[in-house]
Amino acid sequence: MPGDKSISHRALIFGALSVGETVVTGLSQGDDVARTEAALRHLGAEIWAPEADTRVIFGRGVGGLCEPASALDLGNSGTGARLLMGMVASHHLTAHFTGDASLSNRPMDRVILPLRQMGADISARDGNLLPLTVAGTRSPVPIEYVLPTPSAQVKSAILLAALNTPGDTSVIEPVPSRDHTERMMAHFGATITEREDGDGRRRITVKGEAELTGRPVSIPGDPSSAAFLIAAALAIPTSQVTIQNVGTNSLRTGFFDTLREMGANIELSSIQTVGGEPVADVTVKHSRLIGIHVPPERAPTMIDEYPVLAVLAASAEGQTVVRGVSELRIKESDRISAMTTGLRACGVTVDEFEDGFAVTGLGRPVPGGAAVHTYLDHRVAMSFLVLGMTSEEPIVVNGAETIDTSFPEFMDLLTGLGAEVSQKPWTRNDYRD
Ligand code: S3P
């Protein structure tokens, strides 16, 4: 598997905030991570690319970023935008943030609010949207912040701002979300502690005015990208696929738990540690799946996997019910709506709720024979391409180029596994509902 997107953003950011040299290997080749890299260059980091997936970063040190001469364009990347907003909020500089049509529609108040409490001056279109401007503060103040909804991006934005803030800044998480920022902060030498805060809440505290030192980082493979290949192998009779180097951090593997409950044959082997993160080879065999009720509390550990789960649920036996995931409405697209609309067009019965969906599995391949839209959402695009591998009639995916934001290798891997994909430029006739 190519490098994890979440961890790749963080490796570049910590490299830029360190003194000395950081060598990152196994970096994600997606456009999202490239946007973060370009933004860090604008902020003064020196970055070399000796190989496609390797970067050598000469950082500026915490507090040492420079004011960018032009706007930071984060493309489609919510992680890039939100983490970098946190990083600049406690630096005495002004940065403008822009993005594509999808990112410009996603709420930013979740990071604006805590960063304002720390002293940053932020003005955003309609108070909440990109384009926005962060005027970082010369004298940041530490805060204690209880996350209103589980979000690793919001948590990370605050923890990054905390690095250049005097005193201790704490984030309290009622429900744990992916902890890549915490792991990497410790790896780069920051003082970061975690403890139980009662009622299962996690309190994460960063000691400010940190000094980070450049370190080597190898990025584990991305479980959220692997999910599409795993889904294809499960759905297609006689398949057996082993995917090497898949990150298995337990805050990312809720999808595996869900699949096992549905009857999937999935095994992990060669378990090891890469870059401070657990990694394994994942072997998947075609399995007859049954519908289940996915526990809402599992959402943070499989938040990016619901679109492809919906696809598997469509040919499973019985109903799959997903509730408590209204966060899906504000991802790269409204994923509840995008998946409901696309699956219905392919002949599947789907009930849509404000906070989820219920898919009535057909217990056999779905009819297909429809055109679906991706709404600038890479995970919607990949989900419907996987569905097209088993549907009775082909599925046309309009806007599949959005896959390049996270997983440019996807099409080649899918065709290498036997998919027949014909690609052609978009024409107006493709756009039929
Ligand atoms: C991410 C956190 C999640 C996830 C996103 C990547 C991260 O978003 O959906 O793809 O790298 O921190 P939220 O923080 O909005 O849950």
Image (spheres, grey):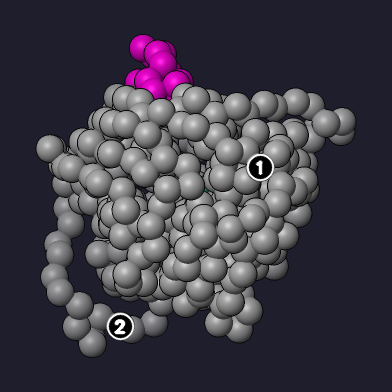
Residue to which mark 2 is pinned: 431
| Residue drawn at 64 percent across, 35 percent down | 206
Residue at figure coordinates x 71%, y 37% from the top left: 168
Classify residue 286 as left or right of residue 307: left
Q: Give whichever of 298, 46 is nearer the camera.
A: 46
| Residue 191 visible in the current orientation | yes
Q: Of 388 and 276, which appears nearest the observer?
A: 276
Considering the numbered disc 2 on the image, is that residue within a helix, a strand or a loop? Answer: loop
Query: Is residue 335 within the magenta segment?
Result: no
**Quarter of the figure that contains the C terminus:** bottom left
Residue 349 visible in the displayed image: no
Residue at figure coordinates x 51%, y 75% from the top left: 132
* Residue under numbered circle 1: 166
Q: Nearer the viewer, mark 2 or mark 1?
A: 1
Residue 207 rendering spot, x and y as whole percentages: 65, 33
Circle nearer the N terminus (2, 1): 1
**Which span is picked out in magenta?**
266-282
Rendering quarter of residue 391: bottom left
Residue type at tag 1: Pro
Q: Is residue 273 above or below residue 20?
A: above
The foreground one among 199 and 417 is 199
Q: Residue 49, position in %: x, y?
A: 16, 42
Q: Residues within 10 Å of mark 2 (few under 14, many from 20)?
A: some
